[in-house]
Image (cartoon, rainbow, N blue to C red):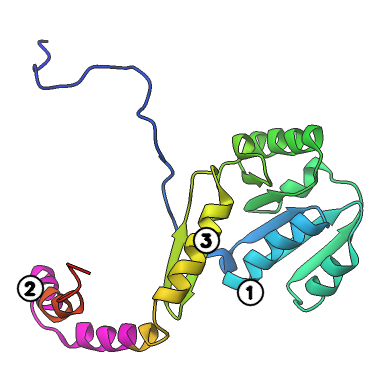
Amino acid sequence: MQIPETQNTDSGPALEGNHLFPVFLKLEQMHLLLIGGGNVALEKLQAVQNNAPATKVTVIAKEVFSNFAAYAKQFPNVEIHVREYQSTDLDDCDLVIAAVNDIPTSELIRNHAKQKGKLINVADKPSLCDFYLGSIVTKGNLRIAISTNGKSPTIAKRLKEMFNELLPAEMETLLQNMQQIRDRLKGDFTAKIERLNEITRGLTDGYEDK
């Protein structure tokens, strides 16, 4: 069969850039395994609780820092086990976060996770990660996730601060109003989109040259 001339058959390396696929997980419907009880693990736990506080979290750690224990104590859905990690800990979870500050142990956990079909994030080791925890901007129901593909968490943090300052607190009211308008619109999907475009076009009027 002759291949059309317009078809690209080049099987060379993928283009450089960020090829991560962004998704928003219903984490509160899942079971998270967090391995580690130090400061980095605390940052991970705080990120989870700030965004999905009802998530079931099981913590496995040989040592649990006092500040970690004090924070986790606020959440009845966080369960801590002070002991060595075992591969069977992965059996009853949906996602894994490893924050153990030990490369061989991190690699072992990652290998176990792959064998059991679990997605894993290994703190500060992008090459061992299936997913990253990006910086999150939240204004009511509006949520923006920022990723630098593991290149610079500092840049992601700075962008988060910038968006938090730029986006007004009234954004939630705007979203609520838009939902009411959408619910009242008649017609098919295309007609609704066209009408919403007309309504929201004024949001950018006058800003093109600024």
Name the quadrant containing residue 176.
Answer: bottom left
Q: Position of residue 6 (x, y in %)?
A: 10, 22
SS at badge 3:
helix
Q: Going from the N terminus, do you reach mark 1 or mark 3 first?
A: 1
Q: Going from the N terminus, do you reach mark 1 or mark 2 first?
A: 1
Separation (CA) of disc 1 from disc 3: 24 Å
Mark 1 surroundings: few (<14), some (14-19) or many (≥20) residues within 10 A: some
Q: Which amino acid does the dot numbered 1 rest on?
A: Pro
Tell me, for residue 53, which label it has, or none: 1
The image shows residue 189, relative to residue 105, as above or below, that is below
Asked whether residue 25 appears in the rendered view, the answer is: no
Which residue matches tag 3?
158
Q: Residue at x 75, y 76 (%)?
A: 75
Q: Are marks 1 and 2 in contact (CB under 8 Å)?
A: no
Q: Nearer the viewer, residue 189 or 70?
A: 70
Q: Nearer the viewer, mark 1 or mark 3?
A: 3
Q: Is residue 175 left or right of residue 3?
A: right
Which residue matches tag 2?
191
The residue segment tinted magenta is 174-196
Q: Is residue 109 left or right of residue 38?
A: left
Q: Nearer the viewer, residue 101 or 6?
A: 101
Q: Residue at x 85, y 74 (%)?
A: 70
- Per the picture, the main secondary structure of the magenta-coloured stretch is helix
Q: Are marks 1 and 3 in contact (CB under 8 Å)?
A: no
Mark 2 surroundings: few (<14), some (14-19) or many (≥20) residues within 10 A: few
Separation (CA) of disc 3 from disc 2: 39 Å
Q: Which amino acid does the dot numbered 2 rest on?
A: Ala
